[in-house]
Amino acid sequence: MPGNRHPYREQWFCGCEYFQHQLPCDPSSLTRWRKRLGPDGLETLLAATIQAGLESGAVRSSSLKRISVDTTVQPKAIT
């Protein structure tokens, strides 16, 4: 692993039951998936996620005045 990464800790925080030596998926898979969905598909997915949060009680409508979505991963910021 490059840099100061701690793969055991990262996998534990992600809920893995056992340590995996290989990456869980090809790093470019998410990029290809987002391109296949396109902007409209991503908006639909975001709307469905918000609706599920409202229906389950995990999100309150007052929390939706501003929504920030960040799908980037910065390995150096993992503590």
Image: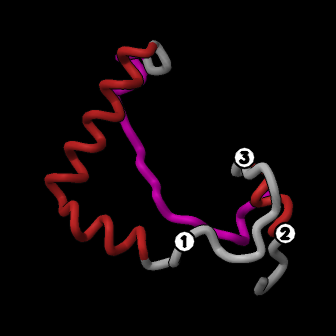
- Residue at (18, 63) in percent of width and height: 38
In screen coordinates, is 21 left or right of 48?
right
Disc 2 versus disc 3: nearer the observer: 3
Q: Quadrant of residue 31?
A: bottom left
Q: Pick the quarter of the image with the N terminus.
A: bottom right
Specify whether residue 37 is painted magenta: no
- Mark 3 lies on a secondary structure that is loop
> Label 2 belongs to which residue?
6
Residue lying furthest bottom: 2
Q: Residue 2's image quarter?
A: bottom right
Q: x, y (%) of residue 17?
A: 78, 49
Count residues near mark 1 (Cα–Cα under 10 Å), then give few for <14, some for 14-19, many for 20+. few
Disc 3 target residue: 15
Residue 6, percent from left and from top:
84, 69
Task: Report which residue position mark 1 lands on.
Answer: 25
Name which residue type carries label 3: Gly
Span highlighted in magenta in the image: 60-79
Give whichever of discs 2 and 3 has the lower sequence position: 2
Q: Amino acid at mark 1?
A: Cys
Magenta stretch mostly in which secondary structure? loop
Spatial separation of the CA atoms under disc 3 and disc 1: 16 Å
